[in-house]
Image: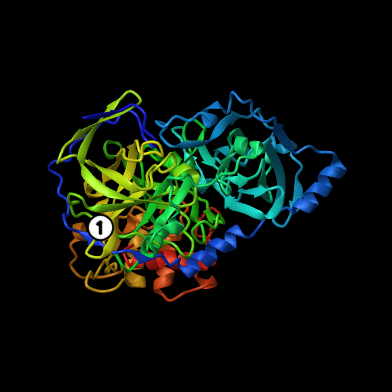
C-alpha cells in the first residue's frame, strides 16, 4: 500500500465503484485516423466567424472621441495576495490553475452605450481591461435574448481577431428558465472587447445582458510562463527531466498529433489548464471529434462549454524552442463524465485544425512489463513525451487531499513507472499508449501521481479505458447506417411520403391521421411511429435548439426533392440557427440521412 497526500493532476475524495458485471468488448482494437475537416462545414463556419465586427474599430474610436462617450472599464492589476494560488501551487491541485476570478462592478446599462448605425441595425462596443493579464475571458449573462441579437468578442488591439457571432443558442441555460450563461473565448492580452448588434426595431433598453465577472489569466500560452516569471526575466525551458515530443521517436511524434492542451473555467470562476486526446470511433464513414480527458478537469456541461483548445503545440525540432499553436474556441458538449473512473468524454463543437490525428485505442488487457508512452502538456509546455513500463492494476480510495493506492488485479486504474520523462500539473487527463499488434493505441487517461524531477521513479496512476468504454460505447462503438424509408423501411426516404410523415409527426399528429392522403395500404401504425420517433430524435437540422415541421422537416423534404443552395433555405428563418447557410444545412441533412 502506498499513500499519496500530495499528487499533481489529482482530484479529492474519489468515490469508486468496481464495474463488475459490466460487459466490455475485450480485445477490441480501433485504428487511428488522420483527421480531415469537412471542407463545406469549415467554409460555412469561416463565413460566419470572419464576418468580422459590425462596427469598425477605427470608426468606433473616432466616434467616441467626438462624443466623449466612455465605453470601457479598467480593473487595476490584482494584488499579489490574489495571485497567491498561482505562485504557490501545490502538487495536489486538480489541474494547473492559470487564472483567477475577478468580480466586476455593474456595467453601464446597454442603452447608455455609444450606439452607431450599421447595415441592418445598430451596434455598440464595450472594452474591459484587467491590467497585467496575459489573457482574458468574461462571463456573459443573458435573459431572454431576442431573436437577431448578435454578440462578438474581439481584441481591441487587433480588429482581425474576432470570435462569434453568438446568439441565444450559444448560451448555456441555468436552472432559471430565462437565465443563460456563456464564458467567452479567451483573448490574448489585458483587454477584451464586446460588440452587441441589434437588428432594426430593437431598443437597447429591452436587452437584459450583464457581465458579472471575468477570468484574469496570468499564464502566457505562447511562452508557457506566468506573468510573475515574465516580469522577473526568468527564461522558461524544459526541465532536465522533461522530454520534448520533438525529441521522441518519429512514430510517437505522429501519435502526438492527437493531443491538445486546453483551458477551461470552473464553477469557481478560476481558469485551469489540462490535457486530452482526440479519439477515433469505430465508424470509418464519418469523423466526429470525440475528446478524452479527466473528470477532475471537466465534469459538467458548463466547464465543457468553456473549453478553449490549443492544437499542434510542439517544437519544430528537438531543442528548437519555437513552438506555436492553433486556438480553436467554441467549447464542447459533455457526453459522459464518470467520477469513479476520473474519465470524461466530450464532443468538440468546432473542428480541430488540419494536421491533427484521431487516436486509435485498445481494450485489450495490459500485460506485465508492457512498455507505455505518455504524451501531455505538463506545466502548459509544448507537447512532452514520457516512456516507461506498466507496473500493475490498482484501486484508489479517496483521502483528504489525495487518494490511497492499493494493488488490485481487478482494479479500475493502473500504474506506470517512467524510465524517461515525467508528468506535471497541466498533464491532467492526458493519454497513455501501448503498442498492440504494431499499432500505437490509447489505453487510458492520467489521474495523478508522484513522478517529478526529484522523484522520477515514483509511479503515476491512469484510469483504464476498457473500464470507461461501457459508458461511452454509444458514441465510440456506434457504426452509422443510412436511414431507411419510414413508410417503406426497405428503401430510401421519399420527399412526398417520408417528408410529409416527418412534418406531421413533429406537428403532433399520431395514429392513422399520419397516413391520410399518403397510402391506402395496411400499415403497422405502432411500428411506423417508433421509426419516426427514432428518426426525429436527432432532427434539429438548423441547430436552433428546436425540432419543428416548419423548419427541420421542411428542409429535409426540400432536400429530398433535389433543392440545393439558396432554393433549399429560401423563406426559412435561420436568424437563431447555428446552421444558417445552405452548405451547413446540406451537411446536416446528409449526416441525418446517413444516420450520424
For label 1, the crowd category at 10 Å Cα-Cα, with few meaning under 14, some 14 to 19 and many 20 or more, is some
Residue 550 showing in the rendered view: no
Residue 447 showing in the rendered view: yes
x and y percentages locating residue 261 in the rendered image: 46, 49
x and y percentages locating residue 346 in the rendered image: 38, 49
Nearest the viewer among 591 and 557 is 591
Position of 499 relative to 410 (above/below): below
Could you say which quadrant of the image residue 429 lies in? top left
x and y percentages locating residue 254 in the rendered image: 40, 63
Identify the residue at image location x=87%, y=44%. 66
The mark total stands at 1
Identify the residue at image location x=26%, y=53%. 371
Nearest the viewer among 321 and 299 is 321
Nearest the viewer among 371 and 507 is 371
Could you say which quadrant of the image residue 434 lies in? bottom left
Position of 572 relative to 87 (above/below): below
x and y percentages locating residue 525 in the rendered image: 21, 59
* Rendering colour mode: rainbow
Q: Which residue occupies the extreme left position in the image?
A: 21
Identify the residue at image location x=36%, y=36%. 455
Q: Is residue 125 left or right of residue 268?
A: right
Residue corresponding to mark 1: 477
Quadrant holding the C terminus? bottom left
Q: Is residue 180 left or right of residue 218?
A: left
Quadrant holding the N terminus? top left
Nearest the viewer among 17 and 383 is 383
Position of 574 relative to 4 (above/below): below
Position of 148 relative to 425 (above/below): below
Element under disc 1:
loop
Q: Is residue 279 left or right of residue 57?
A: left
Amino acid at each position: 500500500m502506498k499513500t499519496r497526500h500530495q499528487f499533481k493532476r489529482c482530484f479529492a475524495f474519489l468515490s469508486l465503484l468496481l464495474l463488475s458485471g459490466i460487459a466490455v468488448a475485450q480485445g477490441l482494437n480501433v485504428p487511428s485516423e488522420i483527421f480531415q475537416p469537412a471542407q463545406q462545414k469549415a467554409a460555412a463556419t469561416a463565413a460566419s466567424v470572419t464576418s468580422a465586427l459590425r462596427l469598425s474599430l477605427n470608426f468606433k474610436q473616432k466616434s467616441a472621441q467626438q462624443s466623449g462617450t466612455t465605453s470601457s472599464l479598467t480593473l487595476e492589476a490584482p494584488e499579489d495576495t490574489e495571485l497567491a494560488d498561482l505562485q504557490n501551487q501545490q502538487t495536489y491541485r486538480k489541474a494547473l490553475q492559470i487564472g483567477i476570478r475577478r468580480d466586476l462592478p455593474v456595467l453601464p446599462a446597454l442603452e447608455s452605450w455609444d450606439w452607431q448605425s450599421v447595415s441592418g441595425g445598430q451596434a455598440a462596443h464595450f472594452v474591459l481591461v484587467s491590467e497585467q493579464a496575459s489573457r482574458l475571458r468574461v462571463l456573459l449573462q443573458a435573459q431572454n435574448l431576442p431573436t437577431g441579437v448578435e454578440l462578438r468578442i474581439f481584441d481591441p488591439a487587433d480588429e482581425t481577431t474576432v470570435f462569434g457571432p453568438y446568439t441565444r443558442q450559444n448560451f448555456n441555460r441555468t436552472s432559471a428558465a430565462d437565465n443563460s450563461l456563456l464564458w467567452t473565448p479567451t483573448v490574448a492580452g489585458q483587454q477584451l472587447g464586446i460588440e452587441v448588434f441589434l437588428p432594426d426595431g430593437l431598443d437597447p433598453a429591452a436587452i437584459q445582458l450583464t457581465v458579472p465577472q471575468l477570468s484574469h489569466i496570468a499564464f502566457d500560452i505562447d511562452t508557457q510562463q506566468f506573468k510573475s516569471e515574465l516580469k522577473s526575466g526568468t527564461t522558461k525551458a524544459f526541465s532536465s527531466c522533461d522530454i520534448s515530443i520533438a525529441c521522441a521517436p518519429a512514430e510517437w511524434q505522429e501519435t502526438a498529433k492527437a493531443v491538445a492542451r486546453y483551458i477551461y473555467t470552473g464553477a469557481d470562476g478560476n481558469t485551469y489548464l489540462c490535457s486530452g486526446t482526440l479519439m477515433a470511433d469505430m465508424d470509418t464513414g464519418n469523423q466526429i471529434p470525440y475528446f478524452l480527458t479527466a473528470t477532475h478537469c471537466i465534469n459538467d456541461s458548463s466547464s465543457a462549454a468553456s473549453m478553449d483548445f490549443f492544437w499542434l503545440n510542439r517544437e519544430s525540432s528537438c531543442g528548437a524552442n519555437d513552438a506555436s499553436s492553433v486556438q480553436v474556441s467554441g467549447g464542447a458538449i459533455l457526453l459522459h463524465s464518470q467520477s469513479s473512473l476520473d474519465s470524461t468524454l466530450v464532443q468538440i463543437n468546432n473542428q480541430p485544425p488540419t494536421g491533427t490525428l484521431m487516436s486509435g485505442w485498445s481494450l485489450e488487457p495490459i500485460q506485465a512489463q508492457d512498455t507505455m508512452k505518455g504524451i501531455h502538456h505538463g506545466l502548459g509546455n509544448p507537447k512532452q513525451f514520457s516512456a516507461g513500463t506498466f507496473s500493475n492494476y490498482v484501486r484508489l480510495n479517496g483521502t483528504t487531499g489525495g487518494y490511497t493506492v492499493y494493488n488490485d488485479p481487478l482494479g479500475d486504474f493502473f500504474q506506470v513507472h517512467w524510465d524517461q520523462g515525467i508528468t506535471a500539473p497541466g498533464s491532467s487527463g492526458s493519454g497513455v499508449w501501448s503498442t498492440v499488434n504494431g499499432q500505437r493505441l490509447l489505453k487510458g487517461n492520467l489521474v495523478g501521481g508522484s513522478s517529478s524531477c526529484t522523484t522520477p521513479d515514483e509511479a503515476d496512476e491512469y484510469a483504464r479505458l476498457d473500464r470507461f468504454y461501457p459508458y461511452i460505447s454509444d458514441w465510440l462503438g456506434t457504426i452509422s447506417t443510412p436511414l431507411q424509408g419510414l413508410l417503406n423501411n426497405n428503401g430510401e426516404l421519399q420527399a412526398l411520403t417520408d417528408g410529409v410523415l416527418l412534418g406531421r409527426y413533429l406537428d403532433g399528429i399520431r395514429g392513422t391521421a399520419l397516413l391520410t392522403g399518403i397510402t391506402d395500404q395496411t400499415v403497422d401504425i405502432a411500428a411506423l411511429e417508433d421509426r419516426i420517433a427514432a428518426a426525429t430524435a436527432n432532427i434539429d437540422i438548423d441547430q436552433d435548439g428546436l425540432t419543428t415541421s416548419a423548419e427541420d422537416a421542411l428542409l429535409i423534404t426540400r432536400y429530398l426533392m433535389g433543392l440545393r443552395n439558396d432554393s433549399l433555405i429560401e423563406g426559412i428563418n435561420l436568424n437563431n440557427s447555428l446552421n444558417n447557410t445552405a452548405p451547413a444545412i446540406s451537411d446536416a441533412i446528409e449526416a441525418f440521412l446517413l444516420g450520424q
